[in-house]
Amino acid sequence: MIPLKDENPTYIFPLVTIGIILLNCIFFLYQLSWGRGLVLRLGAIPYEITHGVDLPPSSPIPVRLTPFTSMFMHGGLLHIGGNMLYLWIFGDNVEEEIGHLRFLLFYLGCGLAAEGLQILTDPGSEIPMIGASGAIAGVLGGYLVRFPRARVLTLVIFGYFIRLMKVPAFLLLGLWFFIQLLNGIPSLGGRFGGGVAWFAHIGGFMAGVIGAKLLGKRR
């Protein structure tokens, strides 16, 4: 199921959501000019973070700060396109609900929680983690808590069945989280992950659910 648009209007300009999308796009263009070398330098590598060492090629920043830079890097057009689509659909409502500054802190906090859980599941991995999906998973968790019954226009593809449907957010996002769990459990220990940091998605989503319950509405 691919969400296209939610029926949940906002009444503020989503400054932070748009700013994050633009920053991701700018960083992605910069990343294209450097190639894989930049991913190895600024991606979050679990082994580097857990051991406090900088594997070659050397990073221009302390390795324990790479979880921040890795949140703005992506592996390709489909990767960044999918992530930004989800952030565009669900981010503005969460931002309006909790306020601009708190949304920014919420987003970054969910991203760090996401990477933290992924590192715990495979602390010796030397594969760099990149992508905003952990932080965006937190936004999805926050949306689920605050707007569970909002309807989302969704492209449903199941074999030859292809149809546009309006799906309640709790069904769409609940199914999304179930898929992360279904794929995440076999990936424990770094096996069968298919290059996807499933537990980053799980950790980010859980952090978003908890954060949305703790944070009140914007003033």
Image (cartoon, rainbow, N blue to C red):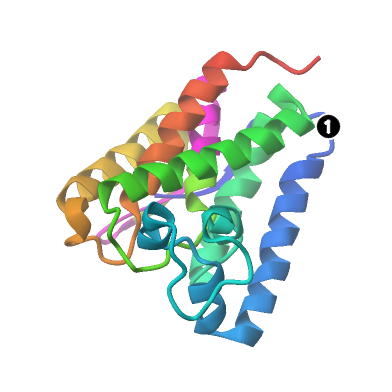
What's the residue at 34%, 60% (across, down)?
Answer: 196
- In the image, 148 versus 191, the foreground residue is 191
Q: Left or right of 38: which side holds 198?
A: left
What's the residue at 43%, 55% (across, down)?
Answer: 49
Residue 13: image x %, image y %?
84, 38
Residue type beneath disc 1: Ile
Residue 131 is at least partly visible in this image:
yes
Q: Is residue 152 magenta?
A: yes
- In the image, 140 versus 113, the foreground residue is 113
- In the image, 80 versus 85, the foreground residue is 80
Q: Secondary structure at mark 1?
A: loop
Residues in magenta, as a range: 138-161
Q: Left or right of 194: which side holds 173?
A: right
**Crowd class of label 1 (few under 14; some 14 to 19; many from 20; radius 10 Å):** few
The mark tally for this picture is 1
Residue 19: image x %, image y %?
77, 51
Residue 153 is at least partly visible in this image:
no
> Which residue position is annotated with label 1?
12
Residue 114: image x %, image y %?
44, 43
Q: Left or right of 52: which side holds 83?
A: right
What's the residue at 28%, 38% (across, down)?
Answer: 178
What's the residue at 35%, 68% (across, down)?
Answer: 127
